[in-house]
Image: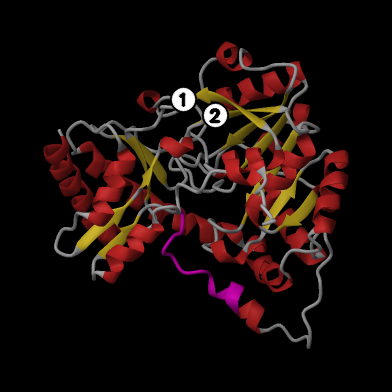
Amino acid sequence: MEKQFRISKRALETVASPIRKFLLFADAAKKKGIRVYHLNIGQPDLETPKSFLENIKNFKENRIEYAPSAGLLRAREAWQKYYKNWNINLSIDEILIMTGGSEAMLFAFLALADFGDEAIIFEPLYSSYKMLATMTGVKIIPVTLKVENGFHLPSLAEIEAKISPRTKFIVVCNPNNPTGTVYNEDEMRTIVQLALKHNLFILSDETYREFVFAGERAISFLDFPEISDNVVVADSISKRFNSCGARIGALISRNKEIIANVLKFAQCRLSSPTLEQLGSIELLENSQGYTKSINEEYKKRKEVVFRALQSMEGVTCLEPEGAFYIIAKLPIENSEDFVLWLLKDFNLNGKTVMVTPAEDFYVTEGLGKNEVRIAYVLNTTDLVEAMEIFKKGLTEYKIKYK
């Protein structure tokens, strides 16, 4: 009798990444000689700082050993200094080194909720949160934000209406991926009030902290001492140091019970990469000089993309306040069809552009069908051309499919 193998429900229900699932079509376009401008993924074209690579090259040991599961002491001290530069004082035992911010989010989901518990997340959301929820058995309760007001938070009452006895935590990404929104102090205090009133954890994704186009940085939930036991922060070197492939992040919490239990998960995966931890130390210790300059670069890139979108008839978006993303509502019915058409059937002088359909950034079915996320991660010269191609493609698509 032939054996029948059954894949887990968890695996079958985990969604594919909307950011990566069209790469086969992009690769096919490239094989035909078409240049594809990638505005679909948060992979900046800026160089990784030379000190990161040099510190790895200067490794003198004759073997690469496991790092401690909590992270190398020097790396944790570097994160401590990094936060001190933002006037956030942490002890070493409040910092765990993670294999990227994604692992920090995964371990936080596992630590903060049991199977069947609920998490409130604002949509549109970073699509990986949906994957994490399915993998961990956490149910996402979405609070829908609107492009028309720049995806800022609704009233406390509207958020509070979503809280149930099974709600365990609220996820906040600030500055926000995928919207580019930066939440102000009043919005942050709304979340703080809810956490205190309903005894909820706050899981704060702060990986874009420095990328703010008005002011020095986004407000951190670590700035609110009254909720110190409620907060878990996921952080990463990926974006601020253009080191996405290094996979070094951190999980931060002043709640010692959370740290002790997340450390068990870290022990299960043994350690984060030793060499990359060593490479990250100097960057974290001397971060501000570097991140200020690249923040200015992203301001220029934001201007190019936003002004281009403003010039397109029927497109709705508000100016991003941070990170390096923007969500735009397009005058079409199905942005996924449009993205596929750009890759399969359209080019302008042998060039096309790839953006991400926004539907998969929502939990609520039917939302985001006519929206796209654009990551302005290319230099301004390339962005100008890419947005011209996008505009021409949108015009032709509307004529063809109206």
Crowding around mark 2 (Cα neighbors within 10 Å: few <14, some 14 to 19, many 20+) is many
Report the span colored magenta.
42-53
Q: Position of residue 337 (x, y in %)?
A: 29, 42
Chief secondary structure of the magenta portion: loop
Q: Residue at x 60, y 59 (%)?
A: 287
The quadrant the C terminus occupies is top left
Residue 49 is a magenta residue: yes
Give the residue at the far front of this rendering: 1
Magenta segment includes 125: no
The structure residue drawn at horizontal position 15% and vertical position 48%, both measured from the top left corner, is 392
Q: Amino acid at mark 1?
A: Leu
In this rendering, the answer to whether 49 lies above or below 329 is below
- At label 2, the amino acid type is Phe
Q: Nearer the viewer, residue 329 or 321?
A: 329
SS category of the residue bearing label 2:
strand
Compared with residue 250, is residue 357 higher up or lower down, i.e. above or below?
above
The answer to whether one can see residue 349 in this image is yes
The local secondary structure at tag 1 comes to loop
Image spot of residue 132 (x, y percent): 64, 43
Q: Residue furthest left?
A: 399
> Which sits in the foreground, 236 or 182?
236
The mark nearer the N terminus, 2 or 1, is 2
Q: Which residue is mark 1?
A: 145
Question: What is the spatial separation of the Cα atoms under label 2 and label 1, in whole angstroms?
Answer: 7 Å
Q: Residues within 10 Å of mark 1 (few under 14, many from 20)?
A: some
Q: Quadrant of the N terminus?
A: bottom right
Residue beneath the point at 34% across and 58% down: 25
- From the image, tell me which residue sits under label 2: 122
Residue occupying the point 49% across, 47% down: 211
From this viewpoint, is residue 84 visible? no
Instruction: State yes or no: discs 2 and 1 in contact (Cβ < 8 Å).
Output: yes
Q: Position of residue 3 (x, y in %)?
A: 69, 55
